[in-house]
Amino acid sequence: MTDKNSNSQHILNTSANLLGLCFIVLTSRNILDMKAATLIDELTAFAIFAFMFSCILSFLSMRSKTSYGEKYEKFADVMFFIGLASLFVTASLITFNIIE
């Protein structure tokens, strides 16, 4: 693997793992019957979208033989951070019972 796509494999692996975690959050929220779940659902769904997009872009970056590979990787990195921030807010809301 060349230097240009060095982070793509890490982004893909971590995004896929966090995508699974988001599905666990959604399932757990339904089992626990939490109040104000719409905000948690929306934030988690947004994180799912961001992680899925990050997975796709990092995969395209690894497979690309053109100059677009670096652009895909940069955008995948941004989407990964957005998903991570969204998941952080969701976890904070659940942990500290900010919403009731």
Image (cartoon, grey):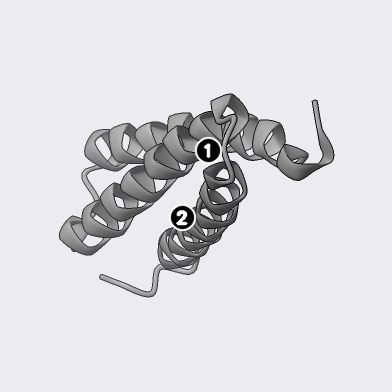
- Residue 85 in the image: state x and y as whole percent: 51, 64
**Taking the image as drawn, is residue 35 in sight?**
no
Q: Residue at x 34, y 36 (%)?
A: 28
Residue farthest front in this picture: 66
Residue 20 x %, y %: 45, 29
Quarter location, residue 3 = top right
Q: Nearer the viewer, residue 49 or 5?
A: 5
Q: Are the residues at dot 1 and dot 2 in contact (C-beta closer than 8 Å)?
A: yes
- The mark found on residue 10 in the picture is none
Q: How many marks?
A: 2
Q: Quadrant of the C terminus?
A: bottom left
- Please tell me how crowded label 1 is: few (under 14), some (14-19), or many (20+) other residues with Cα within 10 Å: some
Mark 2 Cα-neighbour bin, 10 Å: few <14, some 14–19, many ≥20: many
Q: Could you tell me the amino acid type at mark 2?
A: Gly
In the picture of the structure, the residue carrying the numbered disc 1 is 18
**Is residue 90 among what the camera can see?**
yes
Label annotation for residue 83:
2
Name which of mark 1 and mark 2 comes first in the sequence: 1
Q: CA distance from mark 1 to mark 2?
A: 9 Å
* Residue nearest the observer in this picture, 49 or 96: 49
Indicate left or right for 43 with 33 as reference.
right
Query: Which residue corresponds to the image point at 22% horizontal and 64% vertical from the top-left?
Result: 39
In this rendering, the answer to whether 78 lies above or below 52 is: below
Which image quarter holds the N terminus?
Answer: top right
The residue shown at (62%, 49%) is 70
Disc 1 is placed on an element classified as helix
